């Protein structure tokens, strides 16, 4: 059984999030990765849970955007993991069946984790297309982490830059979320809504430059590592 979806207490009881229409295209039903996908859970439930996680962690009922009308999921035999594209109203997530097959031992968790990551891309703001890619990917993996779907190979404290992306940036955002009392990433995403990216936004939210925050974070990780309390 996959782990239960973890949602933030701030949105309890859970509001009625804007759930888009879902479409599913499985290009080769006989591919063993496609079979594993179908064995992982009801596609509609997994997609709905991904939307619930994204809306819960990035928005409130008042701030949640209502532009996404359709999310189409395509299972394709291709290299890589997944990618998302589309318009303001219609999004398409393409998911590699070979990746699902490669994660066979924990396919149900991996499918849910990847769907949450890609669903973030359907709903997150990107500073009118100017947001650094590492921050976009970091926010996506942060929601995956917070939803309780981090894969076992993730390690905190890897990566040399705050904007290295994926779990490196995701864990950094998680440290900031804890430090700024559980509303940092929501504020960050909101700040990316309708103005171009500007590093001053870090100062506006925290009073510090992102480089200073990263240095403090890395120092704390070093102290934890020295004390043997870093999970790795
Ligand atoms: Zn991504």
Image (spheres, grey):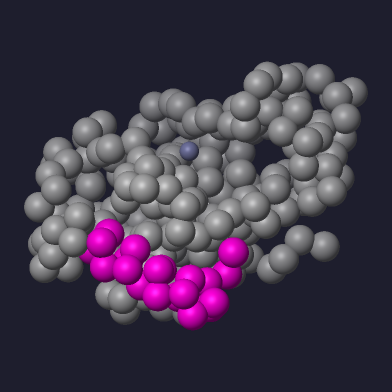
* Residue visible at 52% across and 35% down in the picture: 70
Depth order, front residue of 175/48: 175
Quadrant location, the N terminus = bottom right
Measuring from the top left, give residue 92's x and y in whole percent. Answer: 53, 29
User: Is residue 176 rendered to the left or right of residue 74?
Assistant: left
Residue visible at 38% across and 43% down in the picture: 164
First to last magenta residue range: 213-232
Residue 120 in sight from this viewpoint: no
x then y, percent, for residue 187: 25, 62
x%, y% of residue 137?
42, 43
Question: Which residue is at a point 46% across and 45% down the rendered structure image?
Answer: 166
Left or right of residue 36, residue 3 in this image:
left
Most foreground residue, 175 or 46: 175
Q: Quadrant of the C terminus?
A: bottom right
Foreground of the two, 30 or 11: 30
Q: Is residue 166 above or below residue 32?
A: below
Q: Is residue 37 magenta?
A: no
Q: Position of residue 42 (x, y in %)?
A: 77, 48
Is most of the magenta stretch helix, strand or loop? helix
């Amino acid at each position: 059984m996959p782990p239960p979806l973890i949602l933030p207490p701030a949105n309890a009881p859970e509001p009625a999030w804007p759930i888009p229409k879902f479409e599913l295209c499985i290009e080769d039903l006989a591919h063993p990765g496609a079979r594993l996908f179908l064995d992982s859970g009801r596609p509609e439930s997994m997609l709905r849970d991904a939307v619930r996680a994204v809306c819960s962690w990035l928005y409130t009922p008042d701030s949640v955007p209502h532009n996404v009308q359709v999310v189409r999921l395509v299972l394709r035999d291709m290299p890589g993991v997944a990618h998302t594209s589309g318009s303001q109203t219609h999004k398409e997530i393409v998911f590699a069946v070979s990746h699902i097959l490669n994660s066979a031992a924990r396919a149900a968790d991996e499918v849910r984790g990847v769907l949450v990551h890609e669903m973030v891309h359907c709903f997150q703001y990107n500073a009118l297309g100017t947001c650094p890619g590492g921050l976009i990917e970091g926010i996506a993996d942060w929601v995956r982490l917070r939803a309780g779907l981090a894969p076992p190979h993730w390690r905190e404290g890897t990566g040399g830059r705050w904007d290295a992306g994926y779990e490196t940036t995701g864990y950094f955002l998680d440290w900031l979320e804890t430090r700024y009392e559980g509303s940092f990433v929501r504020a960050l995403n909101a700040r990316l809504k309708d103005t171009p990216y500007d590093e001053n936004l870090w100062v506006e939210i925290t009073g510090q430059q992102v480089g200073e925050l990263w240095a403090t974070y890395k120092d704390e990780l070093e102290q934890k590592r020295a004390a043997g309390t870093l999970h790795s």
